[in-house]
Image (spheres, helix red, strand yellow):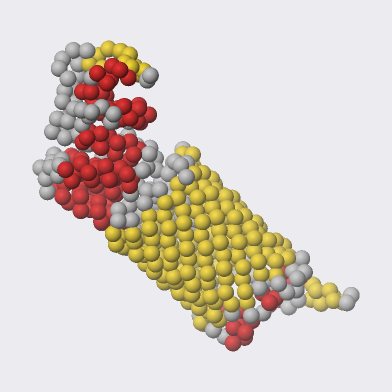
Amino acid sequence: MLKYIFVILSVGAAAPVLADEPPPQVLPIVETPFFDDPLKIEAKPKPKKPEVAPAVDAFPEKQTESVELNEDDLRRNPELTAQLIERAMRSQNWPLLADLLALYRTMPEHDAILYDYASGALLRSQKKHAQAIAAYRRIISAHPELSYVRLDLAGMLYENKQYQAAKDQFERVKADNIDANARALADAYLERIQKQAGWQFNAGVQYERNDNVNNASSVEYIEIGGRRFIREEDSLPKRANGLQYNFSAERDWNLTGNHYATTEASVDGTWYWDNKDYSEESVRVGAGYKNQNIRRWASVEPFVGYNRLGGESYSRNFGATAEYGGWVNDNWQLIGSAVHMQRRYARDYHAKRYNGHLNSASFTAAWLPTAGLMVYSGVDYSREHTVEKTESSDRKGGRVGVIKEWNNGLSTRLNLRYALRDFDKPSIRHDKEYQANVAVWHRSVHLYGITPKLNFRYLKIDSNIPVFYSRQNKQWFITLEKTF
């Protein structure tokens, strides 16, 4: 038999369980920012104490004492059990609430509205939003006048990324006779929904110093048959200084429920003022489908792209991406993705050698123990087919990274990658690729929402044919980015 120790009212009449309406459990708007990382792993929001909109206080201040109650005591007093359910809900004592609800639903005289309301709050705490929403819809269907229950329902729909449905419920709440605080909360949600439904823009520019812009081997001599040949200056690594830029726009269109149409477009490139032959520019446009809720997301997006090099048309590509990701629990997130891409080169010389396609897949696991720390690792595989078999290859690799927000305002990002690339012909060619990326910035240093970040990128390719394929590249650059 279950036993409980409660602090309960010892004097005075018991307050009604559902005065005008159940006490609302609407949580504050929780932002879910993305860490500044190409993986775009969803960051764990900082814990906040839930805001409870004003309602009739079921527990006025009275003298209290601790008593021990068992299951029989609760069965003999359904009204007291109902009060304890409300108190457990207000204090977010979810284990106790689960026990009380399991007992309460077996009582013939239990209040179905209270049971659905408390069950919905419990399911919401467990991120089981579909079931919680169903429970609250049952209440609203039977009692459409319960505005604060509708407010809670709208908040859950927002959390579950059902923005159109949430908007409808918030607007219906505002049409009711609710107090100023609840109205302000509804307005805040509606403003956020409007922002979510609009275009999201990101722009950035950075200075770049590249000590190997032509991706050449630094070996100065070639020995063939005992004879040494000196490589021409033009075939050795070249340096360049320039600006790297990017601009992107994307929008998710909420069709119905958790279903979305997605659109995105981006332009990025590098302009070298002292070596313009290596300036490059890429344009990409995509549109597809996404399904998302509070726990997971899945998307498929066809795309087309166009590339320029040295001011001239270089290549075009087209294909599709697919992604699936979700939270395993409050601290672990898993993401899997796959890409198929076709490449077509503008010049016949390149087309006869490099036209082909690329298939790739990746898997990432991220651990977010606190709001200011993320540690992740992943594995990658790609298979590239080209007309010329010497450029067809398999690449297998892994990566680890950490992003940390320090108490002094500093933020750091470290990412390490390793890959082994095996070429089809000649079968003796094997490249080992090492890459490191480091970024440092201070969260209080910004102007008009733009935070400068100091970056260092290192790439080394160690080939078993070093004279042609081994190389390394070091880049220092400062990025200025803004999302709006």
Residue beneath the point at 25% across and 51% down: 166
Asked where in the image residue 289 lies, by quadrant, the reply is: bottom left
Q: Say whether residue 274 is left or right of residue 389.
A: left
The image position of residue 327, as x and y in percent, is: 45, 47
Residue 479 visible? The answer is no
The image position of residue 352, as x and y in percent, is: 62, 84
With respect to residue 179, does 312 lie above or below? below
Residue beneath the point at 49% across and 39% down: 369
Q: Quadrant of the N terminus?
A: top left
Report the number of discs: 0
Q: Say whether residue 2 is left or right of residue 153.
A: right
Asked where in the image residue 300 lies, by quadrant, the reply is: bottom left
Q: Residue furthest left?
A: 177
Residue 86 visible? The answer is yes
The image position of residue 407, as x and y in percent, is: 46, 38
Q: Residue furthest right?
A: 226
The image position of residue 96, as x and y in percent, is: 35, 26
Residue beneath the point at 77% across and 69% down: 428
Which of 155 and 448 lies nearest the eye of the viewer? Answer: 155
Which of 326 and 355 lies nearest the eye of the viewer? Answer: 326
Q: Quadrant of the C terminus?
A: bottom left
Asked where in the image residue 50 lies, by quadrant, the reply is: top left
